[in-house]
Image (spheres, rainbow, N blue to C red):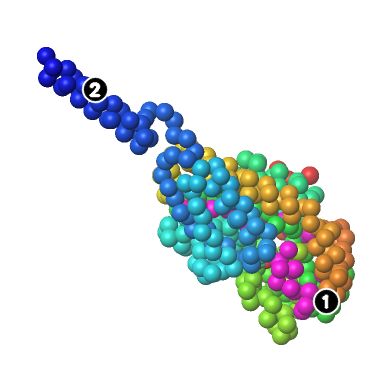
Amino acid sequence: MKRLRNLGLTLLVFMLILTTAACSSGKTDAKPAAGSGEKYTFKLAHITPTDHMWHKAAEKFKEELDKRSGGRMKVEIYPASQLGTEADMVQQISSGSVDFGFITAAYMSSRAPAFTAWFAPYAFKDLEETNAARDTEVAKKILGTLDSQGIKGLDYVFAGNRVMLFKDKEVKKPEDMKGLAFRVTPSPPLQDFYKSMGASPESLPLPEVYAAIQTGVIDGMDMDLDATITNKYYEVAKYGAVTNHMVWPAVAMMNKAKYDKMSDADKKIIDESIKAAADYSAKTRASQEEEFKKTLSDNGMKVYEIDQKLFEPYIKQFDEKYSSTDPLIKEFMDTFRK
Ligand code: BEZ
């Protein structure tokens, strides 16, 4: 009898140990909490210096992921073209050796033509309106065109609009651009816009621009205010026309196979963290406009504006040419041209 009681007690203790072990290893039927589930260390690459808004947005994304995943999702950021050109980075993202990228829509327009839509000149009133456009059907459909390249387009990160910088000529109207060697990001719609005004567009990636203007290889450049400051172009360009003629999105993207394999809960963490980073970028950047113009003036650049009306014939030419090249570009123009 005593032996039977001892056996019963031993069995009870054994079952208790088993139950406790199962619970502590998290193997219950309950929905996983943010802190439980697979652990990830992602790589994210982009081309801008660490004081540019896109890098700050990458840091915000890292912080949001860490917080929302309870520390399971970490990000290593590779800024300033450490992993090569944008072409290299997109290749790495597509193959999965890099997980995330913030890549210029300008470069993406050469791989997926619908991204050209974003370069419709003067399509938006201001940065707020531009940021709101992220949430439209057509903006999402454009991201979807990356699926066939093994890339999940997640969102757009804005860092201010485009301006025109000139080495030593104060360009007051589009026709003054005639004959100027003018740097643009390698992207067909940007080249076409400047060609239509009579400039000779020179396709140069960001890291080559400073030396090119300093040595007189180019007379001016298409740029954003943030990069004008972070790359110190005020040292080599005397005139800055704050035209705001085009918006400037980075496409936030991820290796599609990796995204597709994640649980729905983890996909949600990725989506919401990118959204938080993109909102942060657009809002912070919009509040810096006056401060940036002042920084440039304080550093000796003549900062001025050119009336948008003077660009109207070139806007029309752009729309006529590109609205017939892709149904998504047409849809974009129909949505945003008022
Ligand atoms: C550019 O190529 O002009 C550029 C690229 C990334 C951020 C800012 C500017």
Identity of the residue furthest to the top in this view: 1
**Foreground label between 1 and 2:** 2
Q: Is residue 308 above or below residue 38?
A: below
Helix, strand or loop under label 1: loop
**Residue 116 visible in this rendered orientation of the protein:** no
Q: Nearer the viewer, residue 10 or 297?
A: 10
68 relative position to 167: left or right? left
Q: Say whether residue 231 is magenta.
A: yes
Which corner quadrant holds the C terminus?
top right
Q: Which residues are magenta?
A: 226-255
**Cβ atoms at labels 1 and 2 below 8 Å apart:** no
Q: State the residue at coordinates (72%, 80%).
A: 213
Instruction: Name the residue tied to disc 1.
Output: 238
Count of number-bearing discs:
2
Q: State the residue at coordinates (51%, 68%).
A: 83
338 relative position to 255: left or right? right
As drawn, the label of residue 38 is none
Instruction: Name the residue tied to disc 2.
Output: 12
139 relative position to 266: left or right? right
Q: Nearer the viewer, residue 226 or 239?
A: 226
Q: Is residue 298 above or below residue 148?
A: below
Q: Nearer the viewer, residue 328 or 20?
A: 20
